């Protein structure tokens, strides 16, 4: 069964986005990371957890523990829509193949054009093919008063 597809459809109907899914085969743990504009709070996680518990029982999905949480301040960017949504934010990249002699980059995300992520780094603008992105995460911005 395609658990990711089932979660995508279900969460979309509840008003959330599936950011990531981690499944640990040995420990039989399912970790579901959700988001929505405006952020996630504890009540969101509890409500989604209750809903998914019932859904998994109906669908016959076997697991020992379900964890539902927000993606955190260093939210991973996985889909093209993530790179569009978070344009203007600082992002750290780990690449499959080097771009400009670097496999790790940090810069301000500008969006996506023709399947290439546009980033402005300290060295200047860079284009990264989506399929070359191994991992991308927002750089947390904490504002102290």
Image (tube, rainbow, N blue to C red):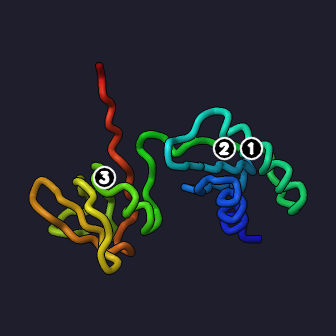
Residue at (44%, 65%) from the top-left corner?
81
Question: Helix or strand or loop: what does disc 1 sit on?
Answer: helix
Quadrant of res 102: bottom left
Residue at (35%, 77%) from the top-left corner?
115
Q: Mark 2 near mark 1, Cβ–Cβ under 8 Å?
A: yes
| Residue farthest along the left direction in this orientation | 123
Say whether disc 2 or disc 3 marks the residue closer to the N-terminus.
Answer: 2
Q: Whole-Å distance between the Cαs marked 2 and 1?
A: 6 Å
**Camera-side mark, 1 or 3:** 1
Quadrant of res 69: top right
Image mark for residue 92: 3
The C terminus is located in which quarter?
Answer: top left
Image mark for residue 68: 2
Relative horizontal placement of residue 112, taking residue 60 as reference (left or right): left
Image mark for residue 129: none
Relative horizontal placement of residue 50, taking residue 121 as reference (left or right): right
The N terminus is located in which quarter?
Answer: bottom right
The image shows residue 26, relative to residue 142, as above or below, that is: below
| Residue farthest along the top direction in this orientation | 145
The image shows residue 64, relative to residue 60, as above or below, that is: above
Say whether disc 2 or disc 1 marks the residue closer to the N-terminus.
Answer: 1
| Residue farthest along the bottom direction in this orientation | 114
Image mark for residue 49: 1
């Amino acid at each position: 069964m395609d658990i990711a597809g089932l979660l995508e459809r279900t969460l979309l109907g509840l008003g959330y986005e599936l950011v990531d899914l981690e499944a640990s085969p040995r420990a039989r743990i399912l970790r579901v990371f959700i988001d929505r504009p405006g952020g996630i709070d504890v009540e969101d996680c509890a409500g989604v957890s209750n809903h998914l518990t019932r859904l998994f029982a109906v669908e016959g999905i076997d697991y020992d523990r379900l964890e539902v949480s927000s993606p955190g301040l260093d939210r991973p960017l996985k889909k093209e829509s993530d790179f569009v949504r978070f344009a203007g934010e600082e992002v750290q990249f780990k690449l499959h193949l080097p771009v400009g002699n670097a496999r790790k980059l940090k810069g301000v995300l500008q969006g996506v054009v023709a399947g290439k992520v546009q980033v402005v780094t300290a060295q200047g603008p860079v284009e990264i093919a989506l399929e070359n992105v191994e991992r991308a995460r927002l750089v947390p911005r904490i504002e102290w008063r």
